[in-house]
Image: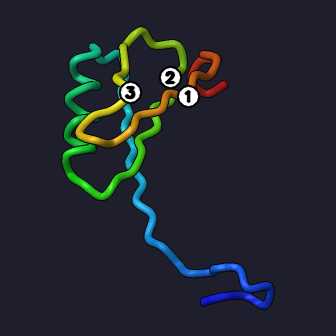
């Protein structure tokens, strides 16, 4: 499907995965990310880090993992 300019307007499915951890050790986070990546259908996982110390791998099972670091302003701020 194309619009009047000829741009491709094909609707593609989007898969969103959400991982929420609270004071979890890095091995727990890595297992959670591995399960999410292993389920299939994801091209990328984004981990939002608000000041944690867990290490995050750059890729698991061929799925890239990006880390978005944000200032830790506290919950409810």
Q: Quadrant of residue 29?
A: top left
Q: Which residue is mark 3?
A: 58
The image's mark for residue 11 is: none
- Which of the two labelled residues, at mark 2 and mark 3, occupies the earlier sequence position? 2
Q: Quadrant of residue 70?
A: top right
Q: Are marks 1 and 2 in contact (CB under 8 Å)?
A: yes
Q: Are marks 2 and 3 in contact (CB under 8 Å)?
A: no
Task: Give percent across and percent down for residue 46.
Answer: 46, 37
Q: Secondary structure at mark 2?
A: strand
Q: Residue furthest top?
A: 53
Q: Which residue is mark 1?
A: 68
Question: How many neighbours does mark 3 have within 10 angstroms: few (below 14), some (14-19), or many (20 or more)?
Answer: few
* Pair 1/2: label in front: 1
Alpha carbon separation for disc pair 2 and 3: 14 Å
Say which quadrant the N terminus sits in: bottom right
- Which of the two labelled residues, at mark 1 and mark 3, occupies the earlier sequence position? 3
* Pair 2/3: label in front: 3
Alpha carbon separation for disc pair 1 and 3: 12 Å
Q: Which residue is mark 2?
A: 49
């Amino acid at each position: 499907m194309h619009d009047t300019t000829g741009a491709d307007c094909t609707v593609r499915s989007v898969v969103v995965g959400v991982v929420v951890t609270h004071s979890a050790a890095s091995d727990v986070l890595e297992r959670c990310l591995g399960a999410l990546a292993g389920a299939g259908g994801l091209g990328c996982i984004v981990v939002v880090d608000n000041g944690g110390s867990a290490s995050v791998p750059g890729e698991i099972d061929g799925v890239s993992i990006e880390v978005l670091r944000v200032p830790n302003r506290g919950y409810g701020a």
